[in-house]
Every structure is written in C-alpha cells, then in structure tokens.
Amino acid sequence: MTIAVIPSRYGSSRFEGKPLAMICGKSMIQRVVEQTQKSAAVTRTIVATDDRRILDAVEAFGGEAVITSKACRSGTDRVAETANILNLSDNEIVVNIQGDQPIFNPLTIDEMILPFRQDPTLLMSTLAFKIKDKREITDPKDVKVTFDKNGFAMYFSRAQIPYPRDKETNVDFYKHLGFYAYKKSFLNKIVTLPTGTWENIEKLEQLRVLEFGYQIQVVITAYDSPEIDLPEDIERIELRLK
C-alpha cells in the first residue's frame, strides 16, 4: 500500500491562500488531489493542512484531509505527522506530493516508487527533469540537482550546478521537481534531525537528509511539472490545460 500526502499551507508571503486559487473552475488543491488519484500505485490520498479553510474545501469536493501542527518546519515534517496520525507501519511507502504543481503527470509517482521494489533497503527517492528551458539553469526559483553514477543525489541548489569553468563544456542540467517517496520509518528519523546548515542557507529541506549522511535516490523523469509560485503563474497553467 502506498499513501500519498499533499502538504498544504494557507499562509504564504508571496501568494496567500494559494491552495484555494481557482484554475479553470477548480481549486488548485482539488486538481493536485485528482492528479494524485490517477496514479496506479497510490491507494490513498490525503491533504495535510494547518488551516480549516483548506480542510473544508477538500472535504467539500470529496477528498480526505487532516489538520496538522502549525509548528511543522517543512512539508516533510507535515507528511511525517500525517503518517503517524494514520498509524502507518514502518515499512509503508509514503509519497510527498507538491501542492502547487496541479498538472503533474501521475506516472511520475509510479516511477519514483519503483526503486523501492528493486532495492528493499532504500530509504528515500525523488524526481528530477532534464532542463530544456535554459532560463531555469540560473533561475534560483528552479532547484537544480547533481547525482552520482549510481543515481544518488550529491547536492541540491538554487544556483547553477555544476558550473562549467569552460563555457563550451557540453553538460546536462537537471531540475528537482520536489516530489519525494520515503519509508515511513525514515520519515520519523528525518523529523528528529536538527535543521542543517545547508538547509538553512538554501531553504531546501532535502539538504537536511544529505547533510546528516543519508542517501536520496534520484529518478529521472521525462515529464516536467510546472509550479505556481505567484498569481500570475495561473494563466500559464490554464493555457496548458486548455
């Protein structure tokens, strides 16, 4: 059984109430829930929120939601709290879905959890997409990832990584899509770790895992997943839906 959790906060300095923003007649959180439910691997989809308005909206369209603490440091902490509310077993696979990517391809969830079937010792995986839009290589909004020959993450950064010293170097760059899968036992471990130095500098929660010596399997997907950061991004997503 695979449980998908969508962390969803109402408060945002750049776009307050973003989960309830309407996109072609449906709220963003409803679109994310519906995309998640299309995954062949996911057996249950739950929104984890700290705001009653989001919970009410999810229940109104027939979705499932739980209230989690406002003190959660990150989306991962909110997912872990939800997994414990549900009393999941330690070997359960829990998927963390980005709540601001309403048109992601559900096949990416299946791709992300496949490594757990191939390697029962795996603790965590995530998704990356080969960058096609050169603007994303240097835009700090788009997180980049580098990984070793075995596909394990070496570093995540808002900066351009790797940085070619010789400008003519032919190198591929990969964008991190922000989705994760974990064993529930490892989720509980992550939330006991203090905030890491890299995590604090880059404001990227996954760096906590690397800084404390754990591995993250990076799964390369052929499907990009555009996100909504600001109200003006909605028009771009609506055009793609139409």
Image (tube, rainbow, N blue to C red):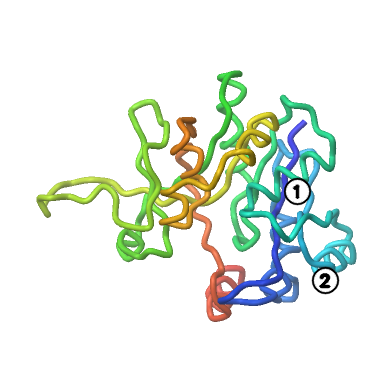
Answer with left or right where residue 126 lies relative to residue 34: left
What is the distance, in whole Å, between disc 1 and disc 2 at their CAs?
22 Å
Q: Is residue 41 above or below residue 82?
A: above
Discs 1, 2 touching: Cβ within 8 Å: no
Answer with left or right where residue 144 lies relative to residue 235: left
In x, y percent, where is residue 103? Answer: 61, 60
- Quadrant location of residue 241? bottom right
Mark closest to the chain's N terminus, 1 or 2: 1
Q: Determine which residue is flagged by label 1.
A: 37
- Mark carried by residue 56: none
Closest to the observer, 237 or 227: 227
Q: Residue at x 75, y 71 (%)?
A: 26
Identity, as a three-letter code, of the amino acid under mark 1: Gln
Q: Secondary structure at mark 2?
A: helix
Image quadrant occupied by the C terminus: bottom right
Identity, as a three-letter code, of the amino acid under mark 2: Arg
Answer with left or right where residue 210 lies relative to residue 23: left
Q: Is residue 62 above or below residue 170?
A: below
In x, y percent, where is residue 53? Answer: 82, 71
**Tag nearer the camera, 1 or 2:** 2
Q: Determine which residue is flagged by label 2.
A: 53
Number of numbered discs on residues: 2
Q: Residue at x 26, y 47 (%)?
A: 162
Answer with left or right where residue 161 lies relative to residue 227: left
